[in-house]
Amino acid sequence: MAKSQETYSKKEKEIKKLKKRKEKEEKRLERKANNNKGKSFEDMIAYVDENGQLSDTPPDPKKKKEFTVDDVQMGARVEAAIDPADLIRKGSITFFNDEKGYGFIRDEKSQDSVFFHINGVLTPPVKEKDKVTFEVEMGQKGMNAVKVAIVK
């Protein structure tokens, strides 16, 4: 009688293959059972609440706000015209360097320190602690005072 050609390692490999096939089939059946296809439209809907978060529940109609087309602004915001009197500020010079021609003005209202250069001064002989009026504009490194004039 002939001896079987199957060895122990061949039997182990065959058992592993069968086990792997069985696990694969079980996973396939599980995926099929938990399939999300065919959900109803209501199950797929998501709502946005008043804070902008996604929610499963529809919004409360009591919190509904009515808007008109005029309330919605498209594009850049239109700024109201600035009164020229609001542009002129008052302050005092806290530092001035005669050699280099620059200094700083302390704004009376905001207490901000604003840079100024001698070229922006209307009445040239200025010194520290002078009371001045000035206008502010944006420069390369921040706010700059221009049209600086001494108050008498």
Image (cartoon, helix red, strand yellow):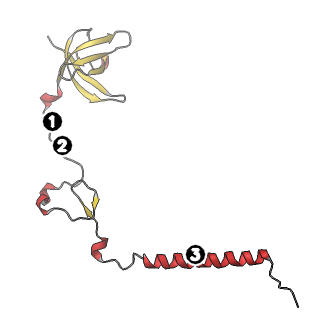
Task: Give, as a three-letter code, the residue at label 2.
Answer: Glu
Q: Farthest front residue? A: 1
Residue that carries the numbered disc 3 in the rendered image: 23
Residue that carries the numbered disc 1 in the rendered image: 82
Q: Image point 61% across, 78% down: which residue?
A: 21
Q: Are marks 1 and 2 in contact (CB under 8 Å)?
A: yes
Task: Give, as a three-letter code, the residue at label 1.
Answer: Ile
User: The residue tagged with tag 2: helix, strand or loop?
Assistant: loop
Residue that carries the numbered disc 2 in the rendered image: 79
Query: What crowding class fits label 1: few (fewer than 14 Cα within 10 Å), some (14-19), or many (20 or more)?
Result: few
Q: Is residue 12 left or right of residue 97?
A: right
Looking at the image, tell me whether mark 1 or mark 3 is earlier in sequence order.
Answer: 3
Q: Position of residue 95 (x, y in %)?
A: 30, 12
Q: Position of residue 80 (x, y in %)?
A: 15, 41
Q: Position of residue 87 (x, y in %)?
A: 17, 28
Say which quadrant the N terminus sits in. bottom right
